Each structure stands twice: as structure tokens, then as C-alpha cells.
Amino acid sequence: MARLKVTQTKSYIGSKQNHRDTLRSLGLKRLNDVVVKEDRPEIRGMVRTVRHLVTVEEVD
């Protein structure tokens, strides 16, 4: 199964509370944190919500 490497590239300071909560749900706590998640529709939806704060790469 494909996996996604999600990296927080921008600070969440000044963003909406919903975006902060989404970053925490993804497991991102601070700038330049990296998590690897399974490629599922739920994860894609969370990434889409904070797409301006993160970068995503596909990992095999």
C-alpha cells in the first residue's frame, strides 16, 4: 500500500483553530516535523485542509 510523507513547512501561527487541530491530528507538532501515513481518503482530506502549511511526497 502506498504511503504519504507529510512535512510541515510553514508555521501554524495565525491560522484557524481547525487547521491547528488538523496538524495535531496528523502528528505534526512543530516546523519541519515529518510523519509517514498510509494513503487513505481520511488522510488525504486532512492534508487538503492544511495544504498551504505542508508538503506531501509519495513513499513506497
Image: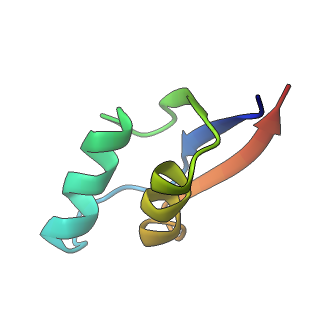
Which one is nearer the viewer's eye here, 37 or 8? Answer: 37
Quadrant for residue 5, please give it: top right
Residue 35: percent from left, percent from top: 53, 28
Residue 45: percent from left, percent from top: 48, 64
Left or right of 15 in this view: 46: right
Task: Please identify the quadrant where the C terminus is shown.
Answer: top right
Task: Please identify the quadrant where the N terminus is shown.
Answer: top right
Picture residue at 52% right of the left edge, 68% below the top: 48
Note whether 3 is above or below 43 in the view shown: above
Picture residue at 59% right of the left edge, 41% below the top: 6
Residue 42: percent from left, percent from top: 45, 53
Picture residue at 28% right of the left edge, 65% below the top: 19
Note whether 30 is above or below 23 in the view shown: above
* Callout count: 0
Residue 44: percent from left, percent from top: 56, 57
Q: Residue reaching furthest left?
A: 17
Quadrant for residue 3, please give it: top right
Instruction: State the scheme by which the image is colored.
Output: rainbow
Left or right of 34 in this view: 13: left
Picture residue at 23% right of the left edge, 57% below the top: 20
Which one is nearer the viewer's eye here, 25 or 10? Answer: 25
